[in-house]
Image (cartoon, coloured by chain):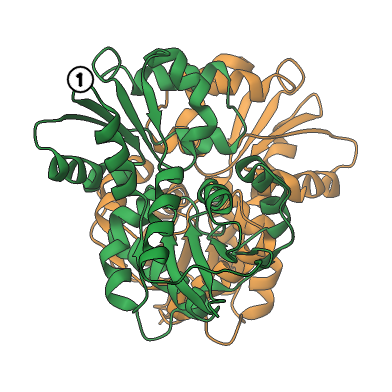
Chain colours: A orange, B green
Amino acid sequence: MERRGIGVFDSGLGGLTVVKELRKLLPNEKIIYFGDTARVPYGSKSKKVIVKYSKEITNFLMTKNIKIIVIACNTATAMALEEIKNMVDIPVVGVIKPGSRRAVRTTTNNNIGIIGTTATIGSNSYYNEVKNINKNINVYQKACPLFVPLIEEGLLEDSVTYEMANRYLNGVKGKVDTLVLGCTHYPLIKKTIKKIVGENVILIDSAEETAIEVRDILYSKRLLRNDEGEESDFFVSDMPKKFEEIGKIFLGTDLKEAKYIDIESYSGENN
Amino acid sequence: MERRGIGVFDSGLGGLTVVKELRKLLPNEKIIYFGDTARVPYGSKSKKVIVKYSKEITNFLMTKNIKIIVIACNTATAMALEEIKNMVDIPVVGVIKPGSRRAVRTTTNNNIGIIGTTATIGSNSYYNEVKNINKNINVYQKACPLFVPLIEEGLLEDSVTYEMANRYLNGVKGKVDTLVLGCTHYPLIKKTIKKIVGENVILIDSAEETAIEVRDILYSKRLLRNDEGEESDFFVSDMPKKFEEIGKIFLGTDLKEAKYIDIESYSGENN
């Protein structure tokens, strides 16, 4: 009987959009989520530090009887996916490959836009992934460093967010027919983004496609759970109450208790 | 012969404004600076986590032969000053008391405004400090959570920064004659703030007054250095190169090499 859980982590709240899709697709599975709310945001940090933090989180998740790890954060996927794969002997899934695959399937004019944090865009991870699938696709990338703070301040349909989006998206609008929201926060400002790039541009968020990839892997390895699952567990490195409150917006349903974890104490031997 | 240094820390770059004033006032002194660039910003974190981080940094600074600690960060001062004082047997100076004292001396209409991060304002530290000095002064407080990300993006005289400042300062303009910039980042947007509150309002930043307090303490304890000092040492928890580049703006002069420190490894027994 397979009863191990699915470990999911993010720099904060955004990864809950992946949890939402996992729950839809795999309602029997138990999810163990870690949000690094003390050290959010990851988007402006170096590879060195993001790898270090991701390893600590992996050490923590590995104490929780899991069968797969989902890096539900674009920046951590871009910076640390390979390192985490090398660290554990269970499957590790990021959000960039599924998102890229979906974008390539979606575009009809072969012009794809990618927006994300400074770290994600600087890594060229999406660019490389898309070019790997089809080298004839034109990829327009743009880092949008103020989106995360604006979203975290709740300015979702605000004139200031619109103004910043207008500047950031200036180089992609009118060119792309598909725009990858390469940060799990960005789906919350879909309306604002649509206003600028136009209703016809298809916005891709990786959550749904990532959930499909997780299901396919668990299915092919015969790791799907058949009996009725347990409730998800949520852990954070700071401010569990705030996480519970704001988490609802991302998750779409109530979020039971989040527990505080001293994540630094999981540095182990992997640093 | 007194040769120990002055330990200064901040969540990132902002504390360099205090270093600048210390150098002016105490050119002989050696300064050892730590900027927690991996875990910046502190302004949205809990007391628990800020105390933890401040203790780690204190453990690190104590390995550097120092005679005084300056918490050159408003949020860390608000959240962790007492804890750090209890931890070490050398003097510990924060920025809130000096800034409050200066504000009280400056106001002529007894109406003082305080702006800062969510954590600083939420702590009521400035409010309490001002009221302690003179309970008849009216204090208007406002958290400005987007100022730090806007400043870190370099949008110092930008229309978006102006728009946010206009919203944040709406409740203080026309009332106060003195406005405390309760975050070491804010001096960089003085021009924008002045445009909104008016040229006559005096903006207080704590850096200069904090340097005076440090000098007074070292003088009274006979800890001032008499011989010519050595160069300052700079340490950060992430991206030393970026710190060197942007640090110049805060410091007003070139900044020699910054070194990377794995600050988590200084958690010691104080967690």
- Asked if residue A210 shows in the view, the reply is yes
The number of numbered badges drawn on the structure is: 1
Camera-nearest residue between A35 and B86: B86
Name the residue at 85% across, 44% down. Answer: A131
**Residue receiving disc 1:** B109
Other residues around mark 1 within 10 Å, as few (<14) / some (14–19) / many (≥20): few
Q: Amino acid at mark 1?
A: Asn
> Does dot 1 land on a helix, a strand or a loop?
loop
Camera-nearest residue between B123 and B205: B205
Name the residue at 39% across, 54% down. Answer: A23
Q: On screen, B135 above or below B34?
A: above
Question: Which residue occupies the extreme right position in the image?
Answer: A136
Camera-nearest residue between A166 and A220: A166
Q: On screen, A188 above or below A24?
A: above
Percent across and percent down for residue B155 are 59, 27
- Asked if residue A24 shows in the view, the reply is no
Camera-nearest residue between A121 and B141: B141
A131 on left or right of B263: right
Q: On screen, A42 above or below B228?
A: above
Name the residue at 63% across, 67% down. Answer: A51
Quarter of the image for the N terminus of chain B: give it.
bottom right
Percent across and percent down for residue A55 are 57, 73
Percent across and percent down for residue B154 are 62, 32
Percent across and percent down for residue B130 are 20, 40
Quarter of the image for the C terminus of chain B: give it.
bottom left
Q: Tag 1, which chain?
A: B
Q: On screen, B138 above or below B199?
A: below
Name the residue at 75% across, 22% down. Answer: A171
